[in-house]
Image: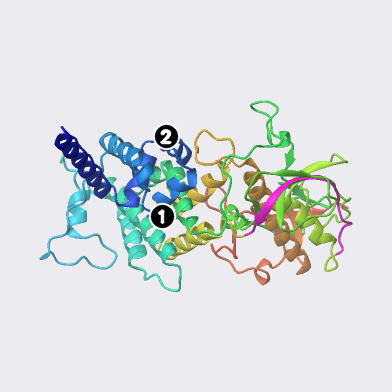
Amino acid sequence: MAGTEGLDGVAALLAEAELAARFADPGERRRLRLAAGLSLDQVASAVGVGRQTVANWEDGSTPSPQSRGKYLRLLDGLSRLHPARPATPAASPTAAPAAPGQPSADSRTSAGRGADGSPLPAESPPARAARAGHARHRARRRTGSADELRAELSEHLTTTVEQELQRAGGDADAATAALVKRAIPDVMAVFARTRAQARYDHTAYPALPDILRKPARNDPDLVWEGRPSWRHPAYRRHPDGELPVTALDVNAAYLSAMKVWLPIGKLEHSTDPVHDRRRSGVHLITPPPWHHRDLPSPLGDREEPGPLWVTDATLRLLLRLAGPKHRLVEEPLIHESWTSSATETFLDSLRQLLAAVREEAIAAGDDVTNTYVKAMYSKFVSTLGESSHNREIARPDWVHLIRSQAFANLWSRAFKAHQAGLTVVSALGTDELHVAGDWRQVWSEGRGLSQMKVKTDREGRPVRYTVTRTA
């Protein structure tokens, strides 16, 4: 009997070792969880470990013997529900290499067949252009980055786009639609990877103060973001106006705004009237009056006087304008705050990665990748709150902070234009600035994060008009 028990124990150990070998790849562990729509917290609860422990396993750490069995059985079950797609056959060693910017013979063959083996329609000229643009993107040599993880993730995103293009038979529109659809789980997986060796851990579901809770389902909470729809009161549009105006777009406003002071833990209440720069969150303030009609208010369209809740990004802007360098306003009065310890670099690795992939895609004419990256950062920001589309993290305070930082960045651009002698005619949302004067003396024209581009209408025509002074 003892011998039989020993054999059963050996069989169990061998079975567990086999599973451990099957799921040794951390990327496969992550793929299975995301394919099943499970959050890190759900897996952690089922296995009986902490959320960060599961994140570490998905970044290459070896599960401990105490929790390995449950985790491996979960992965085994998920693998039967979500088997990996078969790998694309390797190219024949005798095949001639494809010309630069053109797909290989093997990729053209696989792209020319549907899932059932039937021939697909010939690629259209735009589809061929999309494939060629992506091939140029792939061929670009990635240099200048000391961060091996960033290079690895950049390659991962590029490969993801390539695979979707192959599945779509080179159809750029179909591949783009598929990539946009998967943008949220993809960006959350990349975010987790960029945080794997980070200095700070964060609270994904902190207890929220009432000011960050919606009074009703379709009502906003009490935090004011400050996004404006501002127009200079002394000017109005007129076809015979004496002042020509150009509408400018800020490139990737939310991507740039991801460099913002974010609270990384549970928000704590304070009635200290002094701003602590090492903390971030939301603040109840009485703002100073704004007397500069040539510039939008740092609070956007806020007209109601008295106290209001603002984000740390808005408060920092007001304090900066009240400081000795500008002295444009008096200091705001801080009544109370909900904050935690903070860092400005929490999202920096993710921001730099997406910015680098975006820049390479633009240089290569790869619109598919560019649209994919835009969907990743815009959906990342918009779903960090209480969203059914993203169950990985719920930080509505982060959403407010990133959006208000985007407006603070727009305000700074308006101020820069004003200092250069341009007339600021309108500031709209977080990414639109209308100015009169030679704006190219202030910014270079282009699609880079520090550049500006002329806004176009639905027909692709530049948005320009004239205004006349009314007062």
Q: Position of residue 262 (x, y in %)?
A: 64, 52
Q: Position of residue 74 (x, y in %)?
A: 33, 37
Q: Position of residue 198 (x, y in %)?
A: 52, 59
Direction from residue 385 to residue 153 in the image, left or right: left
Residue 128 appears in which quarter of the rendering? bottom left
Circle 1 is placed at which residue position?
369
Q: Are marks 1 and 2 in contact (CB under 8 Å)?
A: no
Magenta stretch: includes residue 343: yes
Given the current orientation, which residue lies at the most extreme bottom position?
Answer: 144
Which residue is painted at 48% across and 39% down in the image?
A: 41
Direction from residue 419 to residue 140 in the image, left or right: left
What label sits on residue 46 in the rendered view?
Answer: 2
Magenta stretch: includes residue 260: no
**Magenta region, mostly helix, strand or loop?**
strand
- Inspect the image, locate mark 2, and give the three-letter code of the amino acid beneath it: Ala
Q: Earlier in the sequence, mark 1 or mark 2?
A: 2
Instruction: Give the alpha-carbon distance from disc 1 to disc 2, as whole Å.
Output: 36 Å
Q: Nearer the viewer, residue 266 or 144?
A: 266
The stretch in magenta equals 327-344
Q: Position of residue 237 (x, y in %)?
A: 75, 49
- Inspect the image, locate mark 1, and give the three-letter code of the amino acid beneath it: Thr
Number of callouts: 2
